Image (tube, rainbow, N blue to C red):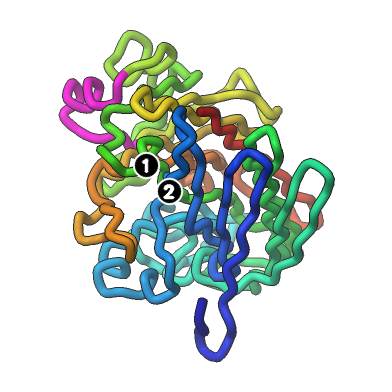
C-alpha cells in the first residue's frame, strides 16, 4: 500500500467460501475493508476505511481521528487527566483528548507497524499480527509483547484473539475499532435495529472519562435488551450512542452480547466476547468530510462500533481488573458473526 518512514505497509485479504473478504493492513493491524453479500447475493463494502494508505494521513482524517478499523491500545477509551497511580507511583501519560489520554495516546497501537504471519486451514484463514510495545511508550510502564490474530471461517465469523505479556505491571486493554454499516452505506445506521444484553452502563463526566459510577438502564430509552431502532432511541435521548454497557453476569467467559440488524439488506451482525463490557458507538463525532476513494460516504451516524474491552478509565476506578500483572498472560476473544 505504501511506506511509512521507509517501512513497507502491506494489505492482506482473507476470503471464505461464502463470498466474504476482509482486508487488514500491517499498519495498525487495521481492518480497512469488509465485503459481504446481502440477501440478494450482492456483495458490497460494510466497513469504514480507505483503499490507499494516504487516506489515513489526510488532514481531514487526522483532525477527526475516528480510528477506522484500528487495533487500539495500550489502553482503550479515556484515562482521566492522562494519569494513574500504580503501586504508589504516579504515571503521566500523553494527552491527546483534551486533558485525557485516549486509546493509548498520540501514537497508540493503531499507529504501529505490526509483524504479520499468515495461516490457512481447511475451514479458515488467519492473520497473526504482533509487535513489542516498549517500556514507557506514551507513558505506560513495561515492555509488552502483543499479538492480535484475525481468523475468518466458513461460518462467516471474524474471530479476533488478543494475547499480551508484560515484564512490569501495566494498564492494558485492547480492541478493534471497526465501523460497520450493514446497508452497505446506502443509508445511515439509524435504520438498523440493535439489541445488547445488558441492563447497566458506566457514567461518564463532561470530558468523556468514566467516573466510576454504574447506573441501571432498565426501562430507559437506552435499555436495549429487546431490539430497538437506533434512530428512535437517539431521538428520544437527543444524542447518539457512546455507551459502555457492562456484562457482569457473564464474567470473562465467551458469550453473546449484541445483535445489530439491517432489514433492508437482510444483513445482521452478532457479537460475542470474553470482555466484561462493550462500548457501543454510533459515530456521532465522525466527520462528513471523510469518504472512501470510491466515493463511499462516511460521516455522522454512517457507521457503528462494537468496542469490546476492559473498563474505560479503569486504572483510576477498577485497577484490579484493568492492570496486566508482570509475567501474566492477557487473553481476550471477540467474535463478529455475519448473516445475510
Q: Residue at x 53, y 60 (%)?
A: 30
User: Is the residue 41 above or below the residue 5 in the image?
Assistant: above
- The answer to whether residue 303 is seen in the rendering is yes
Residue identified by numbered label 1: 184
Residue identified by numbered label 2: 45
> Looking at the rendering, which quadrant does residue 53 occupy?
bottom left
Q: Residue 87: x percent and y percent?
A: 64, 55
Q: CA distance from mark 2 to mark 1?
A: 5 Å
Question: In the visual, does 245 lie left or right of 337?
Answer: left
Closer to the camera, 147 or 213? 147
Q: Residue 115: x percent and y percent?
A: 69, 71
- How packed mark 1 is, by other alpha carbons closer than 10 Å (few <14, some 14-19, many 20 or more), is many
Closer to the camera, 153 or 234? 153
The tag on residue 120 is none
In the rendered image, residue 110 lying in the magenta stretch gets the answer no
Q: Residue at x 67, y 45 (%)?
A: 16
Closer to the camera, 337 or 207? 337
**Contact check, label 2 and label 1, Cβ < 8 Å:** yes
- How packed mark 2 is, by other alpha carbons closer than 10 Å (few <14, some 14-19, many 20 or more), is many
State the extent of the magenta-drawn residues as a range: 229-242
> Mark 1: which secondary structure?
loop
Q: Residue at x 25, y 68 (%)?
A: 60
Toward the right, the furthest residue is 122
Amino acid at each position: 500500500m505504501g511506506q511509512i518512514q521507509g517501512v513497507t505497509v502491506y494489505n492482506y485479504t482473507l476470503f471464505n467460501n461464502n463470498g466474504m473478504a476482509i482486508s487488514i493492513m500491517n499498519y495498525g493491524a487495521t481492518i480497512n475493508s469488509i465485503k459481504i453479500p446481502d440477501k440478494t447475493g450482492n456483495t458490497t463494502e460494510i466497513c469504514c476505511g480507505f483503499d490507499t494508505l494516504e487516506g489515513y494521513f489526510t488532514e481531514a482524517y487526522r483532525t477527526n481521528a475516528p480510528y477506522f478499523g484500528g487495533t487500539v491500545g495500550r489502553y482503550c477509551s479515556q484515562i482521566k487527566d492522562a494519569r494513574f497511580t500504580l503501586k504508589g507511583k504516579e504515571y503521566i501519560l500523553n494527552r491527546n483528548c483534551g486533558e485525557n489520554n485516549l486509546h493509548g495516546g498520540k501514537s497508540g497501537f493503531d499507529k504501529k507497524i505490526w509483524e504479520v504471519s499468515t495461516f490457512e486451514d481447511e475451514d479458515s484463514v488467519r492473520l497473526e499480527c504482533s509487535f513489542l510495545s516498549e517500556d514507557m511508550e506514551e507513558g505506560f510502564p513495561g515492555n509488552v509483547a502483543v499479538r492480535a490474530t484475525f481468523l475468518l471461517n466458513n461460518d462467516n465469523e471474524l474471530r479476533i484473539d488478543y494475547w499480551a505479556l508484560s515484564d512490569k505491571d501495566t494498564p492494558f486493554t485492547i480492541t478493534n475499532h471497526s465501523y460497520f454499516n450493514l446497508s452497505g452505506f446506502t443509508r445511515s445506521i439509524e435504520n438498523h435495529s440493535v439489541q445488547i444484553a445488558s441492563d447497566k452502563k458506566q457514567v461518564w463526566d463532561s470530558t468523556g472519562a468514566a467516573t466510576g459510577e454504574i447506573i441501571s438502564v432498565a426501562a430507559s430509552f437506552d435499555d436495549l435488551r429487546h431490539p430497538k431502532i437506533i434512530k428512535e432511541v437517539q431521538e428520544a435521548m437527543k444524542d447518539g450512542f457512546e455507551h459502555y454497557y457492562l456484562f457482569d453476569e457473564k464474567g470473562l467467559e465467551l458469550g453473546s452480547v449484541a445483535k445489530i440488524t439491517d432489514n433492508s439488506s437482510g444483513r445482521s451482525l452478532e457479537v460475542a466476547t470474553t470482555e466484561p463490557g462493550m462500548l457501543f458507538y454510533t459515530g456521532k463525532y465522525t466527520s462528513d468530510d471523510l469518504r472512501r476513494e470510491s466515493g463511499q460516504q462516511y460521516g455522522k451516524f454512517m457507521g457503528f462500533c462494537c468496542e469490546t474491552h476492559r473498563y474505560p478509565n479503569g486504572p483510576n476506578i477498577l485497577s484490579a481488573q484493568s492492570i496486566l500483572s508482570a509475567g501474566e498472560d492477557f487473553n481476550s476473544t471477540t467474535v463478529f458473526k455475519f448473516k445475510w
